[in-house]
Image (tube, grey):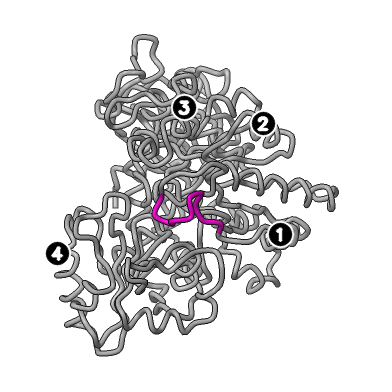
Amino acid sequence: MLPLETGPSEITIVHGPRIETMTSARPEALALGNGRVLATGATGDLRRLYPAAVTRHLDGALLIPGFNDAHCHPSFAAEQTLRVDLGPASAPDSATALELLRARAEATPAGEWVVGAGYDVVHSPSPRLDRRSLDTVSSRHPVYVIGSSWHAAVANSRALDLITADPASNGPGGSFSADDAGELDGWLYELPHMNTAWSGTVLPPIPPDALASALRTQNRILNALGITSYTDALVTPASWAAYELLRRSRAQTARTGMLLWHAHRHAVGDLPLGAGFGDEWLRFGGVKLMYDGALSGGTCLCSAPYEGPSGTGTGIQVLSKADLAEIVTDTHRRGMRACVHANGDAAIADVLDVIEAARSRFPEVTVNHRIEHCSMTGDEAIKRIAAAGVIPVPFGAFLGHYGDDLVRMYGSGRAAAVARHRSLLEAGIAVPGSSDFPCGPADVFTALASLTTRAAGSGTILGERERLDPRRALWVYTAGSAAATGEAGVKGRLAPGYLADFTVLSADICAGDFDATEPGWAARVQVTETWTGGRLVWPATT
């Protein structure tokens, strides 16, 4: 399959649904050619302008710019399909997870790793997996299970021996959990797990060609959800290589930005890795680092205590502030975007301190840095974000998906202050849409409903004032995401010169009679078509 904007130069005029361009224009039709929007206007006028064009009537109610997920992890989702898949659909309980792991161990030569992924750490089945239960899988294999948050994992005794022997796994910035008797129970939180999973020296790597094939499948899954662009928010050299293979195979159906895990930032130092390096199909977007734990996992760094699995009372600080400053300053000096994972209010304040200091030290560098998730933002933090030109990337669907868990872990006040999209937008900040998939649902409608209702699964409304109207919610997942990735001039709107990436919906959620505050409205809306580069990619034609 050729890249979507290559091949014969054919002009197509599309019309039928109402078109929301995310500009002031309300055209009846779009003229597409060479992967871009050539013109907008009345269908008859475009036919006269392009008499040789093919005209297509599209079924649906609303045509919008393609959804753009500014923070997700398709490479994690692809990896999960190539490991032992322990997601809730495959392993609804721990007994099933153990059976699947035993089956893989029986088919694996002794001494080689058996790795599972996707085990639900938020709603852990009882009894929860631990070192002793994984020891029943095998004593001849190191067994390692990555949790659904990708911030924690659990290992058997053989794997723990190998991991704890690695000096990189024994520093600050996380913990090895212990039972009441003081023995390691097999659980690794934050940095010990990250160094195990992403260093490239402990877990066996997945062959790039296998990962590239799995990524192609993930792209198709995202296309079915109306997604035409995304940022993979943590890649390593291995997953970068897989994306390059996919790009060279000319099989991409979604445009990809990549955030490189900070431990590998010097490995590609000879490349001109300024923010935006690459092309419109595969781009380097910045350097990824983590400062605190997971919102859904109850390990984010907060100023006030809460009950969480870390046992610290205020969450986990993954890096020292000095190390954070060193990495962010070096990244800023080199003209690259620092993309710092920070959820809790204490973490966000520290990250802003460091970004402000780096900008002051090197004012000639104008790159805008990102705070990934940026979950618990008070009014003062929002002012600082706007003043420092920082791009916050809050969760789209987490209130709807995890809201009741957030209330249980952090209290209703903090839960209501999570993902303050409206306040950020009112401060003049371009806010993108993000799912954190597979740590959260990839379905954009789940996120849009969360943004417009602020309703947890129980129906509890968390921060009603932060609700968005449907058009602003769509803006977040289109023009907002394009602005956050530095592509506002080519993506996120449908206007002449912009990429011909769009999605057709079965319902006009911007219509005046559409009630987007009603819980459950998302289930009534579907994606009917997805186009990338002026070509239909879903439903798939090949």
Q: Nearer the viewer, residue 92 or 68?
A: 92
Q: Is residue 411 above or below residue 139?
A: above
Instruction: Report helix, strand or loop for mark 1.
Output: helix
Q: Nearer the viewer, mark 1 or mark 2?
A: 2
Please name the residue that numbered disc 1 is placed on.
331
Residue 495, numbered circle: none
The residue that mark 2 highlights is: 380
Number of the front mark, 3 or 2:
2
What mark, if any, has residue 473 been given in the picture?
3
Whether residue 330 is situated above or below residue 528 in the rendered picture: below
Whether label 4 touches label 1, CB < 8 Å? no
Magenta stretch in the rendered image: 308-317
Helix, strand or loop at disc 2?
helix
Give the mark, 3 or 4, whose residue is nearer the N terminus: 4
Q: Which residue was labeled with disc 4? A: 95
- Alpha-carbon neighbours of circle 1 within 10 Å: few (<14), some, or many (≥20)? many
Which is in the foreground here, disc 4 or disc 1? Answer: 4
Side of 336 relative to 255 (left or right): right
Residue at the image point whose x is 33% and y is 30% from the top:
456
Name which residue type carries label 1: Thr
Front residue of this view, candidates 40 and 403: 403
